[in-house]
Amino acid sequence: MLPRLNTLLDKVKQAEQKQHLYFMIGTIGENSGDVRAGMLLLEKLEQETKPSLLESILEEIAKQRCIHNTERIVKYIDDSRSSVREAAIQAL
């Protein structure tokens, strides 16, 4: 299911639809413990620029059981947008 959701994310342009897809990926990772969900979210974190999408991804990362590499999250702690900073702190 994760590869299909990733493909959909690449095709979808609307932020609201992307948020729903990030939620699904996060829920799959949270419920199954599949580390691929966390890795996919981290990958998408570097691709997004909109604050609302960054927050969504970081919130879903926070729900994951195991994130092996938190370096990608750390850079958002110094973000100028307070909502992104708070989400990054929660993700760590």
Image (cartoon, grey):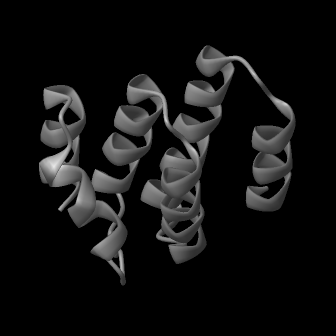
Against 37, is 82 above or below? above
What's the residue at 47%, 70% (across, down)? 33
The spot of residue 8 in percent (x, y) is 83, 40
The answer to which of 41 and 72 lies nearer the viewer is: 72
The furthest residue to the front: 80
The furthest residue to the bottom: 68
Is residue 23 found left or right of 18 in the rendered image? left
Against 22, is 50 above or below? above
The spot of residue 14 in percent (x, y) is 70, 17
Is residue 54 found left or right of 70 in the rendered image? right
The tally of labels here is: 0
Residue 16, quarter of picture:
top right
Against 48, is 68 above or below? below
The answer to which of 81 and 55 lies nearer the viewer is: 81
Is residue 18 found left or right of 69 in the rendered image? right
The answer to which of 49 and 33 lies nearer the viewer is: 49
What's the residue at 51%, 60% (across, down)? 29
Residue 79, quarter of picture:
top left
Residue 81, quarter of picture:
top left
Quadrant (top left, top right, bottom left, bottom right) of the C terminus: bottom left
What's the residue at 49%, 36% (across, down)? 49
What's the residue at 22%, 64% (across, down)? 74
The spot of residue 24 in percent (x, y) is 59, 40
Quadrant (top left, top right, bottom left, bottom right) of the N terminus: bottom right
The spot of residue 32 in percent (x, y) is 52, 64
